[in-house]
């Protein structure tokens, strides 16, 4: 461990302790030692590897850098990480996979990756891998062999049916390979689509067996804990029924290999999104509630009219609205590598309080939560017209700082990092890092928060940011009092619901206080209670 690494870890621990004291609000705060998470209701940290931490000074983030900064992530009480693709690829983003059983030289070696997996597990953290099996790179040997098989008229070749080929060019997403043959590439000419009809109709065929072997290789041979599936709505673009069949095959195949692996899908979108849970996939990202300035998390966090209703709407069991079936795990996020940064979505440029409340709202909801690297220090995407601007270097103040991603727009550090560096945030007891550390701690301390949907007990008619939800039943039940108003404090008489003790608070300014049956809720605060 480097000297800088030790200093950063110690600083974060001090900030965490300070934050606990700052936000406790009363002597009844009983967080104590946090329980280790043993299921898939986790707080996940998303890493875009090439922009995260550079351990060897070449300007590119790498796996060793992630290992060296893993304590930073764990100290914020995250208990899992998701890496965007790390396989051999021709691009900086790595979503065009050349070889599924490789680690790209930009990031290190397979041995480095194995050490990262081990380091995560030693800290009680899981690691999920981005699995891109809607398409491959055009440089994949699979595709090269498939093209040669078509050009030489060899339908008996193993790779002949690995991709979608036709002698008719159906549109602008079909590209010539010569000799009258065209192949499909929905995203890009250099990302040819795999032939999922072949997988579904020939589950004992070469392609299905190769994909199964890829999953086995990572789940068993290299002990990853699951996959994030890219582009789950594009196996058969526009055909939900067939997409669900593909996902069911993926889920059944992966769970047969490793029954406790966790799978989360990118998407789907639209009114029929909830139907995708018929596939059995554990989670789908809730685009219904994230990534836009008018989404439920942002509206609740900013104290907009009906703020408590926006919060409660996220945390409910109505499948057609939440996008979840019983037994599935909601996957909540505010931003990721394809969206604007949380700073813009939550209007953190207006007030950091908006961002704090965004992470408080998400922490109080059922499911698994995801935080995009750098959002904990308020990184800005500053120009969302280019994806590269959403994937800028993590603002360390040490030798781990990466160079900007090629193709990004030039901008001053004060624009990209309006809240300053990681180290500056670690020294500030009121920083967003300190708040997220606290929010994750409260979430982990009381398991019912993440594992149960909220039952609304009370909504205030005068302050539409104020209300109470119950999570869990019996001795495991907790009661969350929320005041999402940014203006008004309120006092509630809880006697009609029973007698309570205050377990923990999460607040931007003053802390809630419980005296007898009366609880005072300052603006922008949460209180976690239980019955006595």
Image: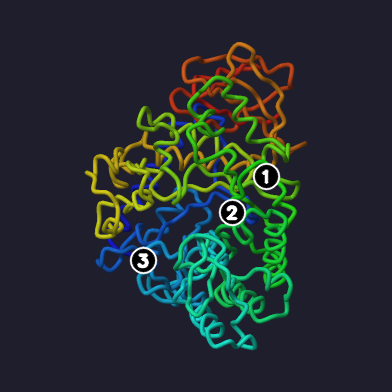
Disc 3 residue crowd, few under 14, some 14–19, many 20+, Cα 10 Å:
many
What kind of element bears circle 1? helix
Measured from the top left, where is residue 457 in percent x and y? 71, 24
Q: Residue under circle 3?
A: 62
Q: To which residue does mark 2 refer?
A: 36
The alpha-carbon separation of the residues under discs 2 and 1 comes to 14 Å
Residue at 57% in and 21% down: 465
Mark 2 → mark 3, Cα distance in angstroms: 27 Å
Query: Is 146 above or below relative to 515?
Result: below
In this image, 263 relative to 48: left or right? right
Residue to which mark 1 is pinned: 451
**Badge 3 or badge 1: first in the primary sequence:** 3
Q: Identify which residue, 241 or 480, lies in the foreground.
A: 241
> Which mark sits nearer the N-terminus, 2 or 1?
2
Question: Image check: 47 left or right of 242?
Answer: left
Tell me the SS state at disc 2.
loop
Residue occupying the point 58% across, 69% down = 168
Res. 417 in view: yes
Nearer to me, 126 or 315: 315
């Amino acid at each position: 461990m480097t000297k800088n690494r030790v200093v950063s870890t110690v600083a974060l621990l001090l900030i965490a302790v300070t934050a606990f004291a700052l936000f406790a609000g009363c002597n009844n705060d009983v967080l104590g030692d946090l329980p280790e998470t043993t299921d898939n209701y986790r707080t996940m940290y998303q890493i875009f590897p090439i922009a995260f931490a550079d351990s060897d000074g070449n300007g590119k983030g790498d796996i060793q850098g992630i290992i060296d900064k893993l304590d930073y992530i764990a100290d914020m009480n995250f208990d899992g990480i998701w890496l965007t693709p790390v396989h051999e690829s021709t691009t900086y983003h790595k979503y065009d996979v050349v070889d599924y059983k490789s680690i790209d030289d930009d990031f290190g070696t397979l041995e480095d990756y194995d050490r990262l997996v081990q380091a995560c597990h030693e800290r009680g953290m899981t690691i999920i891998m981005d699995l891109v099996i809607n398409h491959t790179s055009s440089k994949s040997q699979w595709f090269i062999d498939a093209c040669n098989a078509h050009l030489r008229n060899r339908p008996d070749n193993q790779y002949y049916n690995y991709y979608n080929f036709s002698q008719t060019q159906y549109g602008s997403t079909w590209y010539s390979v010569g000799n009258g043959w065209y192949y499909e590439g929905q995203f890009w000419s250099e990302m040819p689509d795999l032939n999922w009809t072949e997988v579904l109709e020939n589950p004992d065929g070469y392609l299905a067996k190769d994909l199964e072997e890829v999953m086995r290789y990572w789940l068993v041979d290299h002990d990853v804990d699951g996959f994030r599936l890219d582009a789950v709505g594009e196996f058969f673009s526009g055909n939900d029924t067939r997409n669900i069949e593909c996902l069911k095959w993926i889920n059944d195949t992966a769970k047969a290999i490793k029954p406790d692996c966790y799978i989360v899908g990118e998407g789907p979108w639209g009114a029929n999104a909830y139907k995708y849970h018929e596939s059995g996939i554990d989670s789908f990202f809730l685009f219904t509630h994230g990534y836009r300035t008018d989404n439920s998390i942002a509206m609740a966090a900013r104290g907009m009219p009906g703020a408590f209703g926006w919060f409660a709407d996220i945390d409910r069991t109505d499948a057609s609205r939440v996008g979840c079936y019983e037994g599935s795990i909601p996957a909540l996020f505010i931003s990721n590598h394809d969206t604007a940064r949380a700073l813009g979505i939550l209007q953190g440029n207006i007030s950091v309080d908006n961002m704090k409340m965004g992470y408080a709202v998400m922490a109080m909801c059922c499911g698994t939560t995801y935080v995009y690297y750098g959002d904990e220090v308020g990184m800005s995407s500053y120009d969302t017209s280019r994806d590269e601007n959403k994937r800028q270097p993590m603002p360390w103040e040490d030798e781990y700082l990466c160079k900007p991603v090629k193709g990004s727009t030039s901008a001053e550090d004060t624009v990209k990092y309006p809240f300053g560096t990681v180290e500056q945030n670690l020294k500030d007891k009121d920083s967003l890092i300190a708040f997220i550390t606290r929010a994750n701690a409260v979430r982990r301390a009381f398991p019912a928060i993440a594992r149960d949907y909220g039952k609304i007990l009370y909504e205030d008619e005068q302050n539409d940011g104020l209300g109470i939800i119950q999570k869990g039943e019996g001795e495991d039940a907790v009661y969350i009092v929320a005041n999402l108003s940014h203006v008004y404090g309120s006092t509630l008489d809880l006697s009609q619901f029973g007698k309570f003790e205050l377990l923990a608070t999460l607040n931007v300014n003053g802390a809630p206080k419980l005296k007898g049956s009366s609880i005072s809720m300052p603006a922008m605060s949460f209180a976690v209670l239980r019955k006595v």
